[in-house]
Image: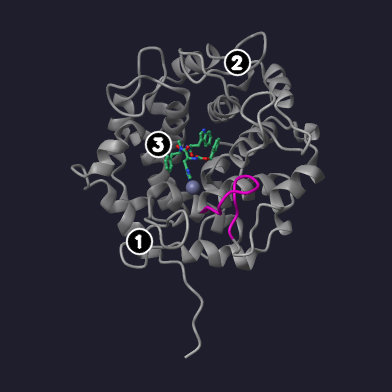
Amino acid sequence: MASTKPQLLRNLHVEFIRSLDNKKDSLEYHLTSHLKLNGVYWGLTALDLLGRLDVFEKEDVITFILACQHSNGGFSGNVGHDPHLLYTLSAVQILATLDSLDRIDSARVVDFVKNLQDPESGAFCGDIYGEVDTRFVYVAISCMSILSSLDQIDVDKAVEYINRCKNFDGGYGSVPGAESHSGQIFCCVGALSIVNRLDTVDIDKLGWWLCERQLSNGGLNGRPEKKEDVCYSWWVLSSLAMLDRLHWIDHEKLIEFILGAQDDEAGGIADRPGDMADVFHTVFGLAGLSLLGYPDLKPVDPRYCMTRDVTKRLGL
Ligand code: BD6
Ligand code: ZN
């Protein structure tokens, strides 16, 4: 019999995400408990893409989010940990997805974010300990735009900082002089796209570098000489989508690669076929499939990694 094309295992993925909450005594749970808030964002966004937000207990999620907010306005990855910009974005994304941004004092969140900008360089630190990275510029811009408060930070300075992280190959690194990396490229292109400054991008050069990430097995890697990985379907594709160069990727082969990384027994998507599934690769695999036009997934907004339903409702 001729082999049939793999299908998206929608119901299994819903069950996989639903089951994550019940694994509280597993080793994985303890290793990742500091990331719990991010995990909730990944699971919730995966369900939204699948059109199954109904399986989440909305009030339980909101209670947890509120318990992670600190008096300085920032959010931590779990109750009792230190606040950080990365978790603050996840918290804002979760509340936006649940149409519940009115449940927090957003002025305090805005204060937390704006205090992390260096007025000289325009860069952002992730927390009070001062590590600088283009990821944090993205997080700040994404957060402020979701909260309609972009006027509270120095956007021109932030754009200048991003431009100082641009490389000869058209890509971007984590700090000035650092090598190009697809994750950082997503952050820089995403930030520039949100503030309508894609005019500063070398679109053809960067588009070329990004589409060179596709390997012969259809998967995408994050930088030259690295292995393919489902999550790079998102970092690379979303960047190409914002640059309007999505058609430079072989859609069929990438769809087949992502579907091949599904766990056909327990559900979920892994980094590559044969590996163990996790919620991180599940959401970015689904979001990648959505950008590729795979049927019956909600359209995703490449700038925010939330469904278009959510970003439209916010007027973004
Ligand atoms: C991010 C995304 C959007 C906006 C700002 C961001 N800042 C950081 C990120 C990436 C973040 C994330 O997606 N948040 O939603 N990544 C992670 O949380 C992962 C978690 C993780 C750890 C271990 C295994 C799988 C997932 N993380 C901390 C990473 O370093 C992952 C690890 C990994 C995934 N696959 C192979 N290794 N790498 C990663 O996210 O790379 C993409 C990246 C890198 C730098 C900047 C942005 C994106
Ligand atoms: Zn990955």
Horizontal side of residue 113 vs 54, given as left or right = right
Can you tell which mark lies on residue 38? 3
Of residue 27 and residue 300, the one placed in the foreground of this image is 27
> What is the distance, in whole Å, between disc 2 and disc 1 at their CAs?
42 Å
Which residue bears the numbered disc 1? 267
Q: Which mark is residue 152?
A: 2
In whole angstroms, how far apart are the C-alphas of marks 3 and 2?
Answer: 25 Å
Residue 197, image x and y in percent? Answer: 75, 31
Say which element carries label 3: helix
Residue 175 rendering spot, x and y as whole percentages: 64, 24
Which of 73 and 278 lies nearest the eye of the viewer?
278
Q: Quadrant of residue 273?
A: bottom left
Magenta stretch: give its range.
219-229
Is the CB of mark 3 within 8 Å of ligand 1?
yes
Q: Is residue 158 magenta?
A: no
Residue in the image at 66% along x and 33% along y: 179
Residue type highlighted by circle 2: Gln
